[in-house]
Amino acid sequence: MTEALKLVPKAEGKQSAKDFKSDQEVRWCPGCGDYAILAAVQGFMPELGLAKENIVFVSGIGCSSRFPYYMNTYGMHSIHGRAPAIATGLAASRRDLSVWVVTGDGDALSIGGNHLIHALRRNVNLNILLFNNRIYGLTKGQYSPTSEVGKITKSTPMGSLDAPFNPVSLALGAEASFVARTVDSDRKHLTEVLRQASAHPGTALIEIYQNCNIFNDGAFEVLKDRRQAEDAVIRLEHGQPIRFGADNAKGVVRDPATGDLKVVAVTPENEADVLVHDAHAASPTTAFALSRLADPDTLHHTPIGVLRSVDRPVYDSQMTDQLDRAVASQGKGDLAALLAGGDTWTVVG
């Protein structure tokens, strides 16, 4: 358990998923992937063993951002794209809370892009759930920062010209200490990723592929259909060879000529070259290369699971230690003296 969770009061008595269901009517479109994610999160919360009054969900704007209403915890439906910033202030000032951010691909990666990357680089004690449906759902079907090139939507009737973000690549580039990807309909996998994220000290980002059955239905069908998924999904497990496909016939190796990763048919001659997944590697280089295997159009060779989980100094712990040292050596600060300090000037007209 992380240092942060050690500070959070324990729950009294046994909890169940029902304890984390609010009295609010859940209002998403019938068939939306958000229902599956909500059920998985509510079902997982008792595992934390924390008092629900010490758990907080913070969201921005979007379909996913209704999430706090449906959790019987504290919550805040905040400003478009600013959930990571608000959650940072909360986590840094109230270390007795378990803080979760719920956001979408439009909310987090468009207007909220800078807030997201700075939370990641600071390594604040947050769990960020990024629902990615590759579309703007709440505003009725415009293309989003993760929509594929050529995507025809209400705002791109001739096809999108923008190259899409890969949220996992973006997080790794921002030096995130925990980065994972999962799928809304795979509850077992989603729950296991939540379990690992919650135990991680610092910022944990989970990208969740989530189906919008109204405006982008079937966007991730290749990863969900059992027959197609066998050749499309690469399930990552720390310490295990990266193999997939029927009878694990395919594997990921490093190209000796370029240094890039590639998928090959595994043979007795190249079996020893298959990479063993190391989620704890200090360098994010291989994790980033894994994130680039997925084809943005077809989603073939999409890694899911924990790509990176490393220890880095945690921002809120460092901030508390810094303040404690300052008080011990200098006493409490004087805000009035700071505001009226020497670096002031008078404007005369």
Image: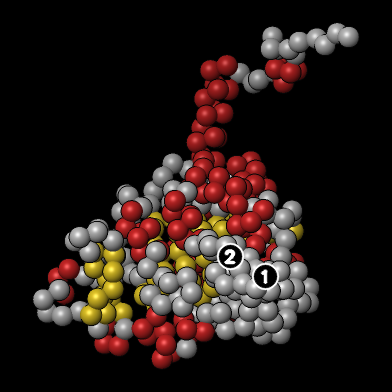
Residue at figure coordinates x 76%, y 10% from the top left: 345
The kind of residue on which mark 1 rests is Thr
Figure label count: 2
Which residue occupies the foreground of this view, 274 or 157?
Answer: 157
- At numbered mark 1, what does the secondary structure look like: helix, strand or loop? loop
- Earlier in the chain: of badge 2 and badge 1, it is 1
In which image quadrant can residue 78 be found?
A: bottom right
In which image quadrant can residue 334 be found?
A: top right
**Label 2: how many residues lie within 10 Å, few (<14), some (14-19) or many (20+)?**
few
Relative height, residue 329 to residue 75 (above, below): above
The kind of residue on which mark 2 rests is Leu
Query: What residue is shown with label 1?
Result: 156
Q: Position of residue 161 (x, y in %)?
A: 58, 65
Which residue occupies the foreground of this view, 65 or 136?
Answer: 136
Spatial CA distance of label 2 from label 1 is 8 Å
Residue at figure coordinates x 61%, y 48% from the top left: 115
